[in-house]
Image (cartoon, grey):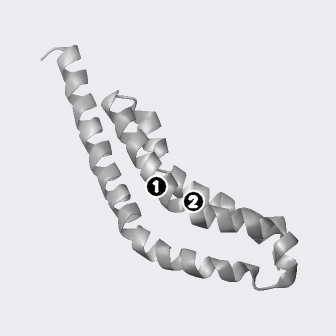
Amino acid sequence: MNVMEIALEVSRKRSRRMRNGAIAVQAVYVLSLPIWYVVSLFSVMLFDDPAAEHFWPVHVFYYSIQSYPYVVIATIAVSWLLYRKRRLVAFAWMNVIPVAFVLLGMLPMWIWGD
């Protein structure tokens, strides 16, 4: 085996390992969607306090909860397109976006919330 064949084999193993990890992570995302539906039903309770209507962190958190399923579906689709194009680093980072999206939506509530 020459150096190019060894490098190609290492690249294939890395690609398969990343693919298997992404499948596991995305399966967790898809399995969380029914649970997230219940969470989104109760997210209306964020506006229970009359002052919450004008409190912008509540709106950010509410819309991050409501748009989570769309973000999950979009990132899964885009990540597999990136995998197909062999952009493995972007593929890996794309799978982090749904979690980061929710955490960034919660950040204003943690900072300015009561």
Can residue 106 be seen from the camera position used here? no
Which residue carries the number 1 mark? 72
Q: Badge 2 is on which residue?
A: 67
Q: Please indicate, yes or no, whether residue 2 appears anywhere in the rendered image.
A: yes
Is 69 positioned to the left or the right of 3 in the image? right
Image spot of residue 40 (x, y percent): 56, 74
Q: Which mark is residue 82?
A: none
Q: In the shown orientation, is residue 9 left or right of residue 101?
A: left
Determine crowd level at label 2: few under 14, some 14-19, many 20+ residues with C-alpha closer than 10 A: some
Seen at 50% across and 51% down, the residue is 96
SS for tag 2?
Answer: helix
Question: Depth-wise, is mark 2 or mark 1 nearer the camera?
Answer: 2
In the depicted structure, whether residue 59 falls above or below residue 46:
above
Q: Residue at x 43, y 42 (%)?
A: 92
Callout 2 touching callout 1 (CB < 8 Å): no
The amino acid type of the residue labelled 1 equals: Val
